[in-house]
Image: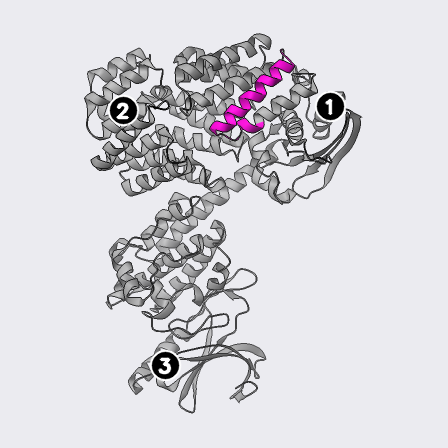
Amino acid sequence: MIGRAIYHYRIVEKLGEGGRGAVYKAEDTRLKRAVALKFFDPLAFDTQEEKQRFIREAQLEASLDHPNICTIYEINELDDQIFVAMAYVEGVTLQQKIQSGALDILPAIDVAMQAGKGLSAAHERGVMHGDFKSSNIMLTEDGQVKITDFALAALPGDAGLSEPAVAGDSAAYMSPEQARSDVTDERSDIWALGIVLYEMLTGSLPFRADFDAALRYAILNAEPPSLSEVRAEIPSDLERIVNKMIVKDRDGRYQSMEEASIDLSAVKRRIESGVRQRLARANAKPSIAVLPFVDMSPEKDQEYFCDGIAEEITGALTRVEGLRVVARTSAFSFKGKNVDIPEIGRRLGVGTLLEGSLRKAGQRLRIAVQLTNSSDSYEIWSQTYDRDLEDVFAIQDEIRLAIVAQLKVTLLGDDRAALVKRHTVDPEAFSLYWKGRFFWNKRTEEGYQRGLSYFRQAIEQDPSYALAYVGVADCYDLLGWYDYLAPDEAFPKARAAAYKAMEMDERLAEAHATAGWICVNYEWKWDCAEREYRRALALNSGYATAHQWYAEYLSYLGRHQESIHHGERAVELDPLSIIINNDLGQVLYYAREYDRAIDQLHRTLEMESAFAIPYFFLAFAHVQKREYPQAIRAARKAMELSGGNDPLNVAQTGAVYSFSGDADRAHGVLEMLHRISRKRYVSPFCRAVIHVGLGQHDDAFDWLDKAYETHDHWLETLRVHPILDALRKDRRYGELLAKMRLDW
């Protein structure tokens, strides 16, 4: 066929072949354009009536004129062989695109919306696709979607030609009504688009089997893995849309493509608005992120020192009024990654970035820094410092002052003193402290223990180093909060270290925030906590962690709008911190805004899918919505990610079982917790929650009383935790609230 002339078409090359015929690229010699010709095998039609019906349908489909539909030019015959001439599309099929991995969320939504527009236009003309699948979607180089093969043809890039809609690769996309051989309508196309969207988001099909009969059975009877289970960062509202598109009963699906497109458009706007908000904040006032410095030393052994310099500069800049500074966690999330300056600026929502490098040889330092405009990578200022090691603190002062000058920020009041404040003048103590922070930031039991060791060494090196005492307090805080140590073992040590730090430096915002945290989580001194948090924010309004912890405190008191405000402020200051994003989801949960909480927790998992804590609160939120399968999956995922025997996540899995009605598994978890408690601390509060779900209220109150006796920090949630609602009318609940001073 190559080189042959068919009427005014000259065959150029063969593009594909299947059971019903072959597809060729050809030149239209009249109009001087490339076309695709699909030749159907004469045996493809069993009867003359079937052949004539095919021609009538092709003529109807040729009337479709839409940017997202591949145009059919004509249908003709040659020696009793039907062929169809259609637009030749340069690009790849969506199926080919997916073979290299799942698509990013926004591009996947965009493809689905374009395809939806094309299908909607066809439906308005009374044309159903009938064989919609990823191999029938072409993606051009400029991102335009072209739907091909309305049950007619395979086009350039297809692996093969379309078979009947219930066979071959088409079978994975067929709707339940197609699997039953029922009459179909546009809702079958909606189902197929839902399957394609699932495939784009996960890289795999929701229903798979080795042969068609098994595949039909799965489509009719099985439920696919949830999107969030396969890919944790999928927003919950997008998951709900896909689930509604592939409901087995078509009356429960979207009833028109337009309905589905409206919801997809809303999700896209929400995701894009988050990006625009970050950019708007960046343009509102001068903003900066200090990226981790690069270790250029020959031995590559100065990573902690590099991190420490960057963090010290960040911490000092947060105290300058009129300058928005992204917190350390977010800025450091790009460490070791090959991401360009404009992309970092966009994701952090900042106008400028400070990059730096350090080279240490003996007692000599070379520190190079560069201040860059994030939108165009334009260098604003740069400087190289060749000094002795003992001059490192003076270098930091010079860098901070230069940044403020370059960004034209006016220093007010005590701003200059805060900007050049030195917490230690001992380089060795400085290095030990930042080694401690490096391990503390890992948020693991081993990380807290190693961090504690380095903080203690820093204190030995410089006993006046107040920040090192804060580090000790923070380690004990989280060893107690995550139940690695009993509260009575961890929190008194945390309190002693925090108050020692404040005694040494009353203007240390970090010390006041940590003291407030202890007042909440161990002492239950609500007035004391408020005083300490307010003092921390007065000293440093840009301290993201103070906003984060204050949000939690306000949440426990039922002051939900204030809580959400401070949680959102913390996210604004540290947008890529997974723990701060998680805690915003947590306070939304306690405010009983379950859908917003689920959305926020999924956004957290977009940043780090292997983080257990968001799954912990996702499980609680799904329990409140009585979505028990999702709750069980989330709880199991939290337990898996935390190693399988972490008592907090083991207990929560038991709680989910108890509320979902699976008493046997819940009792099994209680027995497991009893065994674990022989070796380590197990939260009495978390055991109580399991008994609440089982309806065993007396047992629940016994464990809540033990929680009070041991200062179990989970009791701070007593006033607001929805999981305890079944107990609220009991006299004992009021008495416990009174003992906690939460009964106003």
Q: Tell which circle, 3 or 2, labels the residue nearer the N-terminal end.
A: 3
**What's the residue type where badge 2 is placed?**
Ala
Give 391 or 286, whichever is nearer the viewer: 391
Question: How far from the left and from the top, in percent, is residue 238?
Answer: 39, 47
Give 333 or 271, whichever is nearer the viewer: 333
Question: How far from the left and from the top, in percent, is residue 428?
Answer: 68, 20
Q: Is residue 328 left or right of residue 186?
A: right
Asked whether 446 falls inside the magenta stretch, the response is yes
Q: Secondary structure at mark 1?
A: helix
Residue 55 marker? 3
Residue that appears at 27% across and 40% down: 628
Relative to 539, residue 74 above or below? below
Q: Residues within 10 Å of mark 1 (few under 14, many from 20)?
A: many
Residue that appears at 65% across and 40% down: 374
Q: Residues within 10 Å of mark 2 (few under 14, many from 20)?
A: many
The Cα atoms of the two marked residues, 1 and 3, are separated by 81 Å
Give 15 or 191, whichever is nearer the viewer: 15
Q: Residues within 10 Å of mark 3 (few under 14, many from 20)?
A: some
Relative to 60, residue 9 above or below? below
Dividing the picture into quarters, in which one does residue 673 lie? top left
Question: Could you tell me if the residues under marks 1 and 3 are in contact, i.e. CB atoms within 8 Å?
Answer: no
Q: Tell which circle, 1 or 2, labels the residue nearer the N-terminal end.
A: 1
Residue numbers of the magenta segment: 438-463
Q: Which residue is mark 1?
A: 392
**What's the residue type where badge 1 is placed?**
Val
Give 657 or 363, whichever is nearer the viewer: 363
Q: Which residue is mark 2?
A: 688
